[in-house]
Image (cartoon, rainbow, N blue to C red):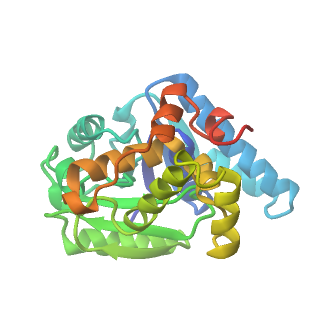
């Protein structure tokens, strides 16, 4: 199917990044959130990002104006009635996501593909809230979405081959590198590999084996990662690491589960969620 209009649910750091990405690639984008302040904040973040590209001469002012013209904020999911494709980027809560998909199922055309940007939750369970599980798929972008190249395309139990093929092609049209996750298992590929490492890093810190600064240095200069685990959690959101690990505890076999370390739980309680709150493992 031809895709020209896209709906993005959630105007947070991931949702706004995804909306920016689609708009930069010529799509008309509707960005929805539950409060006007969230919508405004998301659109402002996009404007800031685009302004930086103009100042670095990576795009012209006209390009920026054209991209901005393709973006529209809204509080009403009813505005998605004519979109060709939806990406949901709401909080990692299965009840919230299921409710959103149930509404989208009633609002959008039967031909519209409904994708979730979940980093760990079951696509199959989300799809069960709709009458079109064959058209529900995972499309997991990485933060920041306009820059990071990878997109995980995740098939639920009833996701059709046609749907997964269409989303892979869409990712390629966005100049991304798609990988297909054939089984709907918690964490998919990247988080299945990464989150246990993050948990182990926090345990090393909790046990007093090393300071977080030295753990970050060890991973960067010993494993050649671009940033250390604490820096990475601050960038992507400490709450995301926490929620994904909690999902692992619920869905993965016992021998593969990782307890949530003390310091990580404490950071969540303190509201230190990383760069987005100006305070995480480090201050910003």
Q: Viewer-proximal residue, 253 or 188?
A: 253
Displayed quadrant of residue 26: bottom right
Residue 190 seen in render: yes
- Outermost residue, front direction? 208
Which residue shows up at 23% across the image and 64% down it? 184
Q: Quadrant of the N terminus?
A: bottom left
Above/below status of 42 relative to 230: above
Left/right placement of residue 283 relative to residue 2 reads right
Above/below status of 6 relative to 227: above
Which residue shows up at 59% across the image and 54% down it? 209
Give the percent coordinates (x, y) of residue 225. 63, 71
Left/right placement of residue 173 relative to residue 111 reads right
Give the percent coordinates (x, y) of residue 101. 25, 42
Give the percent coordinates (x, y) of residue 271. 55, 28
Left/right placement of residue 217 relative to residue 159 reads right
Q: Viewer-proximal residue, 258 or 274?
A: 258
Residue 83 seen in render: no
Which residue shows up at 40% across the image and 40% down it? 90
């Amino acid at each position: 199917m031809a895709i020209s209009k896209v709906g993005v649910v959630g105007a947070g750091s991931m949702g706004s990044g995804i909306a920016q990405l689609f708009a930069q690639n010529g799509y008309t984008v509707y960005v929805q959130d539950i409060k006007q302040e969230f919508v405004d904040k998301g659109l402002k973040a996009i404007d800031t990002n685009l302004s930086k590209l103009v100042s670095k001469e990576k795009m012209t002012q006209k390009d920026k104006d054209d991209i901005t013209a393709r973006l529209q904020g809204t509080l009403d999911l009813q505005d998605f009635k004519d979109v060709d494709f939806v990406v949901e980027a709401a909080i990692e809560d299965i009840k919230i996501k299921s409710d959103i998909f149930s509404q989208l199922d009633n609002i959008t055309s039967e031909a519209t593909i409904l994708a979730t940007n979940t980093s760990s939750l079951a696509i199959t369970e989300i799809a069960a809230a709709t009458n079109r599980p064959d058209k529900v798929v995972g499309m997991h972008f990485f933060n920041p979405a306009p820059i990071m190249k990878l997109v995980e395309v995740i098939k639920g139990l009833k996701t059709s081959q046609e749907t997964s093929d269409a989303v892979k092609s869409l990712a390629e049209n966005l100049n991304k590198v798609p990988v297909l996750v054939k089984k709907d298992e918690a964490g998919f590929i990247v988080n299945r590999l990464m989150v246990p490492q993050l948990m182990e890093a926090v345990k090393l810190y909790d046990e007093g084996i090393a300071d977080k600064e030295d753990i970050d240095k060890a991973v960067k200069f010993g494993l050649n990662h671009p940033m250390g685990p604490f820096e990475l959690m601050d960038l992507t959101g400490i709450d995301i690491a926490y929620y994904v690990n909690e999902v692992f505890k619920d869905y993965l076999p016992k021998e593969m589960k990782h307890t949530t370390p003390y310091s990580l739980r404490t950071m969540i309680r303190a509201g230190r969620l990383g760069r987005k709150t100006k305070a995480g493992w480090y201050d910003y």
